[in-house]
Image (tube, rainbow, N blue to C red):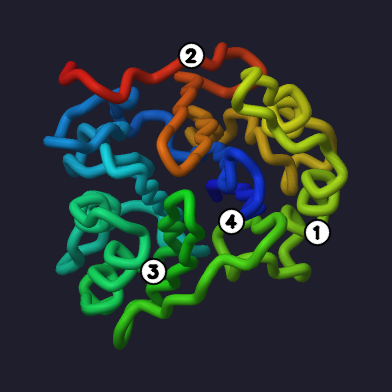
């Protein structure tokens, strides 16, 4: 179960700030974010060739999360890792969401997506039939895991969304993400609801991302491991690997 937290405050210098932990099979190979595709900086899944999170040179972010019970590939289904790449070929978040909304959700295992730019964002649910469902991001904190966004019945959201709301909002201009990083790195009990999943049965938190969007700027920091053990480093957004 991956987790993504977004703060949208349209009057701030950085209207969008995002933090995300990626939980995955420990033996699934991947490469840290770089410009593997023209105009797109994203991590690369070495198994299926797609990505779980990336940004483009227009300041659009796209992130993908598996829904409950849908870990891994399935026969006859396209890779969900293609979806962020489809979205990131657009120049705005609205255009990217439109691209995803025209797809057949039945071609993919179930998924949640966030697509955003400095002007706002969209939450997308793919439920394995019909068209993906699109809703705008509202102001304040949004939290996404493996179920519906901001669902208070989800134990992880119930535990952590109030804590992110109470924590100091990151200040990308001074690179101060300390309050949010502490929450991303938390492994306190109960283990089944923690954001930072310790390795168990070949599964756990494998990386973490921090992203901020402003009208004329994008910041991306990445930890190539669990955020309690791996340092966040700046991701270059201009050069190919």
- How busy is the neighbourhood of tag 4: few (under 14 within 10 Å), some, or many (20 plus)? many
Q: Earlier in the sequence, mark 3 or mark 1?
A: 3
Q: Nearer the viewer, residue 169 or 84?
A: 169
Compute the Cα span from label 3 to label 2: 31 Å
**Picture coordinates of residue 98, whole percent (x, y):** 28, 73
In space, the residues marked 4 and 3 are separated at their CA atoms by 13 Å
Q: Which residue is mark 4?
A: 145
Question: Residue at 41% of width from left, 57% of height from top?
Answer: 115
> Callout 3: helix, strand or loop?
loop
Report which residue position mark 2 lands on.
Answer: 233
- Determine the residue positioned at 47% across, 49% down: 118
Sequence-first disc among 4 and 3: 3
Residue 158: give its label: 1
Residue position marked by numbered label 3 in the rendering: 110
| Distance CA(mark 4)–CA(mark 2) | 24 Å
- Residue at the far bottom in the pictured view: 130
Circle 4 sits in a helix, a strand or a loop, which is it? loop
In the rendered image, the quadrant that contains the C terminus is top left
User: Where is 136 relative to 86, above or below?
Assistant: below
Q: Residue at x 26, y 37 (%)?
A: 57
Q: Would residue 220 be found to the left or right of residue 38 on screen?
A: right
Q: Is residue 33 above or below residue 147?
A: above
In primary-sequence order, the first of circles 3 and 2 is 3
Within 10 Å of disc 3 (Cα), the crowding (few <14, some 14-19, many 20+) is: many
């Amino acid at each position: 179960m991956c987790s993504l937290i977004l703060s949208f405050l349209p009057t701030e210098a950085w209207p969008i700030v995002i933090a995300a932990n990626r939980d995955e099979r420990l033996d699934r190979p991947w490469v840290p974010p770089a410009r593997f595709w023209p105009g797109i900086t994203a991590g690369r899944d070495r198994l299926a060739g797609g990505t779980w999170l990336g940004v483009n040179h227009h300041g659009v972010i796209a992130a993908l999360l598996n829904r409950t019970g849908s870990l891994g590939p399935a026969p006859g289904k396209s890779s969900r890792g293609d979806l962020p790449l489809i979205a990131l070929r657009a120049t705005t978040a609205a255009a990217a969401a439109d691209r995803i909304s025209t797809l057949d959700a039945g071609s993919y295992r179930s998924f949640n997506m966030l697509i955003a730019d400095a002007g706002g964002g969209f939450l997308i649910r793919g439920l394995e039939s019909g068209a993906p469902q699109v809703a705008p991001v509202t102001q304040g904190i949004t939290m996404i895991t493996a179920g519906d966004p901001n669902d208070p019945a989800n134990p992880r959201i119930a535990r952590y969304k109030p804590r992110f709301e109470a924590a100091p909002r990151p200040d990308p201009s001074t690179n101060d993400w300390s309050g949010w990083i502490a929450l991303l790195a938390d492994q306190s009990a109960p283990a089944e609801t923690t954001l930072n999943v310790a390795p168990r049965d070949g599964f756990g938190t494998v990386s973490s991302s921090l992203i901020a969007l402003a009208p004329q700027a994008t910041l991306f920091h990445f930890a190539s491991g669990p955020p309690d053990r791996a340092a966040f480093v700046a991701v270059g957004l201009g050069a190919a690997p």
